[in-house]
Amino acid sequence: MGFEQFGVVSFTATTKVEKFVDFLREGKVCGTICKACGAKFFPPRSDCNCCLSDDMEWFEILGDGNLLTYTEAMYAPAGFEKDVPYLLGVAEFKDGAKVFGRLDKSMLEGGITPGMKIKLKTVNLEEGRISYELTSA
Amino acid sequence: MPKVGVIAVGQSAFVRSYPGSIRELAFEAFRDALSGSGIKANDIEASLICSAPEYDKQRTPAGLVAEYLGLNPQPTFYVESVCSSSSSGLRTAYALIASGLHEVVMVLGFQKMSEISSAESQERMGRGADIQWEAPFGTMMPAYYAMHARGHFTKYGTTEEDLALIRLKSSTYGVINEKAVFRKSLTLDKIMEPKYIATPLKMMDCCANADGLSCIILASEERAKDLCKKPVWVKGLGMATAPINMAGRDTFSGLKCAQLAAKRAYEMAGVGPKEIDVAEVHDCFTIAEMMAYEDLGFAEAGQGKELIRNKETYKEGRIPVNVDGGLLSKGHPIGATGGSQIRTIALQLKGEAGEIQVPGAKIGLVHNIGGVGIYGNVTIFGVD
């Protein structure tokens, strides 16, 4: 299975970083790091725009992050209607890596506040699709 | 830099559903710009057609529109930066004229959004962000701007009521704009009804989709003086970009591209925010206007709320903003929006803005954003 299995609806079938999906299946959310100059990227990239190298390795985003902002979407674009309402947000992790994605819906029960501690988890979706979510640490 | 002037402006009415095809819609704004101006189709040496793709089925619309307007065999091509397409068109026209390649260039911005449903439209707008890493989560413009509203509230203590005051101002002027799609008078209670689209943004914090078209004609100094009694001059052009992916953003309380574009435009024009007499800002959502107050330097960061609380951005205030109703009332036919903003400022500086005229306006500013702060265009106009 390739990158078209990522997320609720995928719009990208082919990418050089499709191993991202393999890592999700292992329970890991990973970015890339340039072996030549050390630049770190999330989302992962196959090319370093700092030094032009394409020699990259993977690193896992670990530990607690800090929720920067979020929203609860009460409407959805075509293809996502059945998920409404759903949460979207951004959190910042170690070394400044920022991660955008869905927030775990169960977070609504405990209240959501920017600044709260966040961790990442992978989630299995319908028909073998896979994604990640931000959830309370 | 050589002087470049705006010599004619036109706009169709912005409506929910235009009862005609794109070429016919184009003709409405073209006719509006040319009528009474003395300018003829064969004076126009090149045309730039601006829109965001995929709302209608026509591919390569520049060729279609140029033919219908009678602009063959002059050069024409397409310019795109989603919601700021026609400001990018103006920037391109400026370069074509300042370089000496052409003397008279038309910038025509259009969008016919009614051919698809609102949910389909949101899906296309969501794909105006990063389709590889963000769209798979179900992104849409209200959600992106809602995250900025939350960021602004958290950092500066701005409230939903502050945003509602921006919509209230918009409604005040939308009621009297005969080209606006939303002309109902609104009360604060109505605006504050808890019909959330993406928290904390409610129904009335969001602009509406629309069909519409704008047409701006620019010329070199010599041709401008020849073809137009009162040209409005382009004094400063600023454009900047920011990462398309939210993971690449430093802040959720302002738009970096707008801050940088403003700095560049002010430097080129040799003026500062205090010298702006009237402004049109990209209020696709109320929070977008709040951030614009601060990104443009009309208020310090975090102090935008004081501007609207004190009605400083009303027509009688210190810095009138969007006194034509803005996108919130006019509607937002994506590719046409920047041209509509430029039209309003040109009319203001010519003293031809009618009921919304800001007395003695000499320097005006247009702030036109593409995507969620991917592309920022700030353009300053003056009468001298």
Image (tube, rainbow, N blue to C red):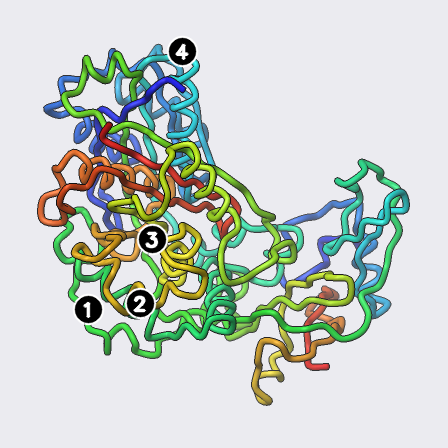
Which residue has dot 1 on it? B186
**Element type at mark 1:** loop
Residue highlighted by disc 2: B204
Q: Chain of mark 3?
A: B
Question: Which sits in the foreground, A133 or B356?
Answer: B356
The residues tagged by marks 3 and 1 sit, at their Cα atoms, a distance apart of 19 Å
* Front-most of residues B122 and A112: A112
**Secondary structure of the residue carrying numbered label 4:** loop
Q: Does label 2 or label 1 sit earlier along the sequence?
A: 1
Q: Are marks 4 and 3 in contact (CB under 8 Å)?
A: no
Q: Are marks 2 and 1 in contact (CB under 8 Å)?
A: yes
User: Which residue in the structure is indicated by mark 4?
Assistant: B100
Q: Earlier in the sequence, mark 4 or mark 3?
A: 4
Residue type of the residue flagged with mark 1: Leu
Chain name for mark 2: B
Residue B133 % position (x, y): 66, 55
